[in-house]
Amino acid sequence: MLFPWQDFKGAQLFDGGVCKMTDISGAIQKCRTLVGPNNDDKIHISLVYISNKALEPWTGKETSFESLNRYFKINNFRKCYRELAASHDFYPLVNYDYVIFPSKPLPGAKFPFTFGKDRLLEMINQGRADAAAEVAKGPGASIDNFLKMAKLQECEDHDVPCPVDEVEAEIKYRRATLREAAFKKQNAAKLQATEI
């Protein structure tokens, strides 16, 4: 990571997208130091990604650099959803309130990179609009949509048919099963801690 944590309005924030994925596990571990080791259900995570799930249309006239950049975007997005899906399974009691991705391709993806005031304002305004849209859906809705999208992408990658209603049912069942097991483990650890 190029930049250290920053204190902002009482919260510690960092941008993990500068040179690697956002360290979700590290953030959860940091939260555990604040809420205690057996209180994952008190942890709330919101993520804002810059990896695009929406790409510029492919024309076939792109330069080698633009083709490579597109490959990196696709690869980074897939890494995002794999890491988030794995984190969601590994920490099932954590509340993943909001997961925000750009709804359309961000400007400035073509060489030469230009990030003047107008471009930055355009990206900031898009980010605000995307965040407002996700917040309007309520906590937890965006992680459900994200997990569904990730599962459907996995099916497509393996050329396996996946009816959407079955994917949604599988996600709900998996979450309920993982949360139940994690609650039992957490409560047993709390009970053991009080007995000592």
Image: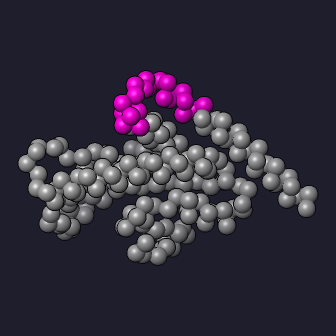
Dividing the image into 4 quarters, which one contains the N terminus? bottom left
Relative to 150, residue 132 above or below: below
Question: Percent from the top left, x then y, of residue 116?
Answer: 19, 68
Q: Give the overall secondary structure of the magenta segment.
A: helix
Towards the viewer: 108 or 73: 73
Q: Could you tell me which residue is drawn at 50 percent across and 46 percent down? A: 85
Lateral position of residue 115 relative to residue 9, left or right: left
Relative to 121, residue 185 above or below: above
Q: Could you tell me which residue is drawn at 29 percent across and 53 percent down? A: 73
Lateral position of residue 48 relative to residue 61, left or right: right
Lateral position of residue 193 relative to residue 50, left or right: right
For the image shown, how many numbered marks are present on the structure? 0
Q: Could you tell me which residue is drawn at 67 percent across and 67 percent down? A: 33
Residue bounds of the magenta highlight:
154-173
Q: Is residue 164 magenta?
A: yes
Q: Could you tell me which residue is drawn at 62 percent across and 55 percent down? A: 43
Question: Percent from the top left, x then y, of residue 58?
Answer: 16, 44
Residue 145 visible somewhere in the drawing: no
Question: Percent from the top left, x then y, of residue 110?
Answer: 16, 59
Q: Which residue lies most toward the left here?
A: 61
Which quadrant of the structure image shows residue 136? top left
Q: Is residue 193 magenta?
A: no
Question: Percent from the top left, x then y, of residue 101?
Answer: 37, 49
Which quadrant of the structure image shows residue 193? bottom right
